[in-house]
């Protein structure tokens, strides 16, 4: 899906009859077409206004790219969370980080700047 419109919010709750189903966990896979072998996997756990991203694994000789990062941030924006927390390994050390997610963050909106300069 490569349209240029801002992503719509995803509902985290679905009501069917007298039951409400709440989305709490999402499995993310990096693949061009569903059902084909994937090159990376991660888990999102949702708790209130927070997303916890863990279990990120990539195929050997593949890396988690800036494009992957921006895609994860777009997903957290669609889920309308306020922060994303994740653990990663850098130089064989575990590093925990937290990022604030804002609806107007330029990186969330297909890398379009919030202001556009034009010649007058």
Image: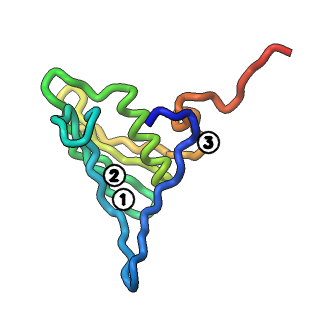
Query: Which residue matches tag 1?
Result: 46
On-image quarter of the C terminus: top right
Along the line of sight, the residue nearer the viewer: 48 or 19: 19
In the image, residue 104 lies at what x, y percent?
Answer: 61, 42
Q: Is residue 107 left or right of residue 33?
A: right
Examine the image and state in which quarter residue 23 appears: bottom left
Along the line of sight, the residue nearer the viewer: 120 or 86: 120
The colour scheme applied to this rendered structure is rainbow
> Circles 1 and 2: CB distance less than 8 Å?
yes
Name which of mark 1 and mark 3 comes first in the sequence.
Answer: 1
> Circles 3 and 2: CB distance less than 8 Å?
no
On-image quarter of the N terminus: top left
Q: Residue at x 52, y 54 (%)?
A: 9
Examine the image and state in which quarter residue 16 appears: bottom left
Marks 1 and 2 sit apart, C-alpha to C-alpha, by 6 Å
In the image, is residue 69 above or below residue 47?
above
- Please, which residue is most extreme toward the top here? 119
Classify mark 1: residues with Cα within 10 Å, few (<14), some (14-19) or many (20+). Answer: many
Examine the image and state in which quarter residue 62 appears: top left
Q: Residue at x 30, y 54 (%)?
A: 26
In the image, is residue 34 above or below residue 26?
above
- Please, which residue is most extreme toward the bottom here? 18
Marks 1 and 3 sit apart, C-alpha to C-alpha, by 21 Å
| Label at residue 52 | 2
Name which of mark 1 and mark 2 comes first in the sequence.
Answer: 1
Which mark lies nearer to you, 3 or 2?
3
| Label at residue 104 | 3
Q: Residue at x 54, y 28 (%)?
A: 111
In the structure shown, which secondary structural element does the residue marked by tag 2 occupy? strand
């Amino acid at each position: 899906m490569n349209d240029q419109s801002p992503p719509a919010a995803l509902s985290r709750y679905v009501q069917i009859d007298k039951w409400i189903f709440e989305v709490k966990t999402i499995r993310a896979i990096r693949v061009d077409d569903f059902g084909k072998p994937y090159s990376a996997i991660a888990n999102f756990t949702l708790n209130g206004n927070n997303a916890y991203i863990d279990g990120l694994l990539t195929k050997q000789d593949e890396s988690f790219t800036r494009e992957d990062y921006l895609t994860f941030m777009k997903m957290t924006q669609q889920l309308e969370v306020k922060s994303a927390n994740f653990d990663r390994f850098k130089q064989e050390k575990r590093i925990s980080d937290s990022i604030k997610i804002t609806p107007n963050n330029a990186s969330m909106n297909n890398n379009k700047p919030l202001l556009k300069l034009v010649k007058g």
